[in-house]
Image (cartoon, rainbow, N blue to C red):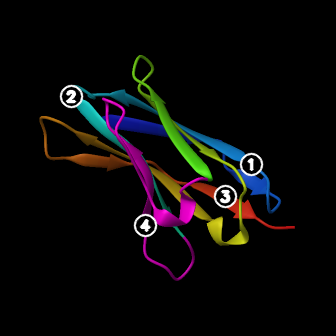
Amino acid sequence: QVQLVESGGGLAQPGGSLRLSCAASGSIFSLNTMGWYRQAPGKQRELVAAITRGGTTDYADSVKGRFTISRDNAKNTVYLQMNSLKPEDTAVYYCHVRFLLRADDYWGQGTQVTVSS
C-alpha cells in the first residue's frame, strides 16, 4: 500500500502564494512521477504540474511562470510553490504518483486551495 499525505492548502488573496507538500510512504519501490492535479466545482480534474524522479517537469499552460514543482527524492516528497495566485486557481488539489515498474497509481485525499479577497 501507498500513503500520500498532503499539506499546505488554505486561503490566499489574489496575488498571494501558497506551498503544497505531499509525502509518499509505504510500498513505493520504483516511485517515478509525482504530480499535482486540481478539480474545481463543476469541472474535470486537470493536471497542474508533474515531475519525474530525474527532474523532468511538465506544467499546465495556465500555471506556467507562476507555479513551480520540485521534489526531494530522499524524502519522497513533492512540493508545489504557487505564486501570483488567481481566483481561478481555486480548487481541490490532489497529489498523484506513478511508478516505473508497476501499473498502479495513487491519489492523495486532496487539499482545498481558495483564492479570494
Hey, which quadrant is residue 1 in on the image? top left
Question: Which is more foreground, mark 1 or mark 2?
Answer: 1
Which mark is drawn over residue 30?
2
Q: CA distance from mark 4 to mark 1?
A: 20 Å
CB under 8 Å between discs 2 and 4: no
**Would residue 102 be found to the left or right of residue 69 on screen?**
left
Q: Secondary structure at mark 2?
A: loop
Residue identifier under label 4: 46
**Would residue 12 be found to the left or right of residue 50 on screen?**
right
Q: Amino acid at mark 1?
A: Ser
Magenta range: 40-65
Q: CA distance from mark 3 to mark 4?
A: 15 Å
Q: Is residue 115 visible?
A: yes
Q: Secondary structure at mark 4?
A: strand
Q: CA distance from mark 1 to mark 2?
A: 32 Å
Q: Residue at 49% of width from left, 79% of height from top?
A: 43
Residue identifier under label 3: 113
- Answer with mark 2 or mark 4, whichever residue precedes in sequence: 2
Tell me where residue 34 appears, x and y as whole percent: 37, 41
Q: CA distance from mark 2 to mark 4?
A: 24 Å
Q: Is residue 78 visible?
A: no
Q: Residue at 48% of width from left, 64% of height from top?
A: 61
Tell me where residue 8 appears, x and y as whole percent: 66, 42
Category of crowding for the residue at label 1, using alpha-carbon neighbours closer than 10 angstroms: few (below 14), some (14–19), many (at least 20): some
Tell me where residue 72 appears, x and y as whole percent: 46, 24
